[in-house]
Image: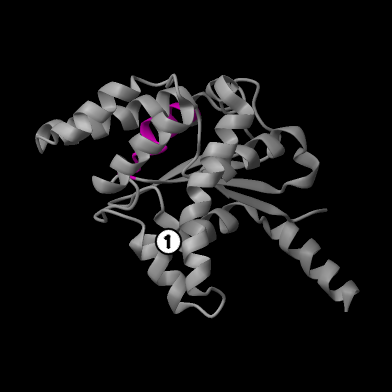
Amino acid sequence: MKFIYVLGHSWGAYLGLVETRRHPENVYAYIGAGQMVDLVRQEQLSHDFVTTQAQATQDHAALQQLKDTGYPPYRDLAHGMEAKYRLLWRYGGMIQGETGPLPFALAMLRSNEYSLWDCVRFLRGMAFSLKSFADNEGARIWRLKAPDPAVGFQTPVFFITGEHDRVTPPALVEEYVRALRAPMKQSIVLPGAGHFAFFTDTRRFAAAVVEIHNRTFAPLDRATAADAVAMAR
């Protein structure tokens, strides 16, 4: 028996969920963090959020920019996404309480694995990836949705979402879970957290993962795993 837990975040959560549906024999349980459910609907909700924030702060330049990009699905995918996500950063919609990706850059600089140039490449890479994705996929990207929940999964499926996630709103995840057919399912919402809960709320996120592990790793499975480890030795 395989004891592989797949955990994906945001775009990676979409890929992870699709893989879990297609190859349940390879996955013991799936955990989606910042789960992408319906691209068009999540982009519309985040567009509404930045529009409301721009109106509240009388940010006329931002409002004009939003008017120019139009409403999702954007006519110009790369331009619309870049403009909207820049505003999401500005209004704290990416990391709760932060107005830019500086916390990521500082974390990278404090680690032993990344250099200053790696931080620069990280920031440039986000823009490059979006443009490359738009150039290759075009309007097809707007058809992206999580697998049909009514068809269901053969694998336990769990989601961890930040209460204030403006990228993949918890309301869409909760709606998906209610319709989902799976041997085991659960939606965990972390109060006060945003889209990057694993980064900003490490302890609570880790506790949620441990809770999922304890719920799915049955006593019989524990014994089987122990036997496998003993044999390997």
**Picture coordinates of residue 134, whole percent (x, y):** 55, 31
Name the element at disc 1: helix
- Using the rendered image of the protein, determine whether residue 174 is visible from the camera's viewpoint: no
Q: Residue at 29% of width from left, 41% of height from top?
A: 87
Task: Kindly indicate the quadrant of the structure image that contains residue 55.
Answer: top left
> Label 1 sits on what residue type?
Phe
Q: Is 130 in the magenta?
A: no
User: Looking at the picture, does residue 175 appear above or below residue 133?
Assistant: above
Scheme of colours in the image:
one colour
Q: Is residue 119 visible?
A: yes
Q: Residue at x 89, y 73 (%)?
A: 232
Quarter holding the C terminus is bottom right
Disc 1 crowd rating (10 Å Cα; few below 14, some 14-19, many 20+) is some
Would residue 226 appear left or right of 40 to someone viewing this image? right
Number of callouts: 1
Q: Is residue 65 above or below residue 206?
A: above
Residue 171 screen position, x and y as percent: 37, 31
Q: Nearer the viewer, residue 104 or 18?
A: 104
The residue lying at 20 percent from left, 29 percent from top is 63
Is residue 134 shown left or right of residue 72?
A: right
Q: Position of residue 32 (x, y in %)?
A: 54, 44
Give the labeled residue for mark 1. Answer: 199
In-front residue for pair 22/61: 61
Direction from residue 80 to residue 113 in the image, left or right? right
What is the quadrant of residue 84 in the picture?
Answer: top left
Q: Quadrant of residue 48?
A: top left
Specify start and end residues of the magenta stretch as a single range: 163-176
Which residue lies at the image location 46% right of the left edge and 62% below the top edge?
A: 207
Horizontal and vertical percent position of residue 208: 47, 56
Q: Against 134, is 4 above or below?
A: below
